[in-house]
Image (spheres, rainbow, N blue to C red):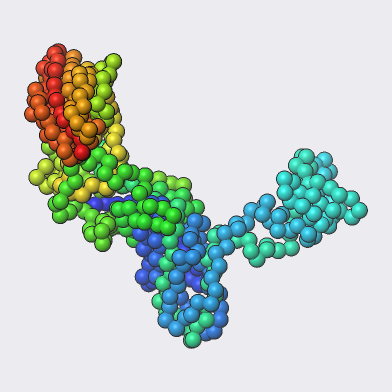
Amino acid sequence: MLRKVLLAGVALGLAASVARAADGPGLEVTIYNADLALVQDARQLDIEKGRQRLEFKDVSSAIRPETVSLTADGVDIVEQNFDYDLLTPSKLMEKAVGQQVTIVRTNPGTGAQVTEVATVLAANEGVVLKIGDRIEVLRDDGVPTRVIFDKVPENLRAQPTLSVTVDSDRAGARLAKLSYLTTGLSWKADYVALFDQPNGKLDLQGWITLNNQSGTPFVDADTKLVAGNVRVAGNDGGGDYNPTEGVTSAGTEANTGPGKALGDFYIYSLPERTTIQPSQTKQVSFLDAQGVAAHRVYQWNAYDLISASEPAHAVVGVDFNNSTGGGLGAGLPAGTVRIYQRDASGSPKFVGEAPIGHTPQGSELLLKMGEAFDVTVQPTLVADTRVSATRSRYSMSYVIRNAKSEAVTVELRQSGYWGRDTKVVSESLTSRKIDAYTVGWSVPAPANGQTVLTSVVETGW
């Protein structure tokens, strides 16, 4: 049910001062979830013998210079610099402080030009000039004025430039490989789910969303995307998503979807090259599953053993499994699922969205859409009895009300118990232990009616 992965790719145009050969191996960009990308550029360079400087222009303005690596046969790196002070009128004026420039003013009425030599004294919130014996502020007062500079300072660049000083043992063309890490490139998964409640089915489309804030165009290159929380110094690698978000039961199936294993992560490759311009977001489809088994779930969680003066609305969600048997059969990269249902006229309507973490194949997921309007739960602490110095007995009553015209089942979960020695003494419905601190019940509520659940639970250590 899955189409082959079609992941948006990016490419990094590294226009070096030494032209890239037409038959060069090309670029590869690997983008991670945590605002990080690895750029690998292999090309043929015509390198002279001895010490020289190679310039790579149009590198990412968010490059991490300490991660740069350049390798070529017979070439040793002496020094490398990343110049990101870009050429602008204000920067040009700042660099001219203490130096002389030529000021040309044009009379708007006659067209006559007056040329003067000025020394730039300051260029902070404005430009202060010394012209002869007078001090003047360069103003935008309607008089056409030009400033002429003798040259462009060496440390100002029209584009971000990586310069590498190398020492070569011979002259000639050879394969050189440049690689570095950069921020400013990111990707995430977005999903669109159409939930067919009457038939218990879910259609799920997956989209890769790429964002380029690196300040550099990425043009026509091989791209790979890595799903997983890669640790970076100063960052725990958690990304924007809880790693277990939306997962009620983690899967153990071997992945049969489009992602391929990369150590403990998954990597998605783009079979075709594409381009992302600076400040551009691009989406490409990577998943299309039809008829995945799913059903609506009402859930209510209590975290303390207390009474509530007002009923609380149950959470409504969609439960499904991404196993092969469930009709999906793919691990899901972290992202946001936007859920739609058809109204009475058959038109899809947005009913909520839910985040999910990186989800292995075979997992059970619950997409929480919001609060149910017609389904509520009201708990009451009937009794709190101390059994011993270390144990207590709690008697609880829960009123589950359903104002809908159809019967529903509410998954009620009560936390707040003390640990593994928790024991259910009596209950009106059979419970199940969720974890050491939580007991759960599946409570049926009739249409336009209510159900009262009672339980007596002893807990302690």
Q: What residue is rendered at 42% in x and 67% in y?
A: 179
Going by the image, does 111 lie left or right of 299? Answer: right
**Residue 307, position as x, y percentages in the image:** 26, 20
Q: What residue is rendered at 38% in x and 52% in y?
A: 236
Quadrant in the rendering for residue 31: bottom left
On screen, residue 261 above or below 392 = below
On screen, residue 299 above or below 344 = below
Quadrant in the rendering for residue 321: top left
Going by the image, does 199 lie left or right of 8? Answer: left
Going by the image, does 251 lie left or right of 121? Answer: left
Viewer-proximal residue among 50 and 426 = 426
Viewer-proximal residue among 378 and 106 = 378
Count the marks: how many? 0
Can you name the residue that lies furthest to the top here?
A: 448
Q: What residue is rendered at 37% in x and 44% in y?
A: 240
Quadrant in the rendering for residue 304: top left
On screen, residue 375 above or below 140 = above
Can you name the residue that lies furthest to the bottom here?
A: 170
Q: What residue is rendered at 44% in x and 64% in y?
A: 180
On screen, residue 313 above or below 259 = above
* Residue 107 in sight here: yes
Give the position of the C terminus as an image quadrant: top left
**Residue 20, position as x, y percentages in the image:** 45, 70
Viewer-proximal residue among 108 and 77 = 77
**Residue 54, position as x, y percentages in the image:** 53, 73
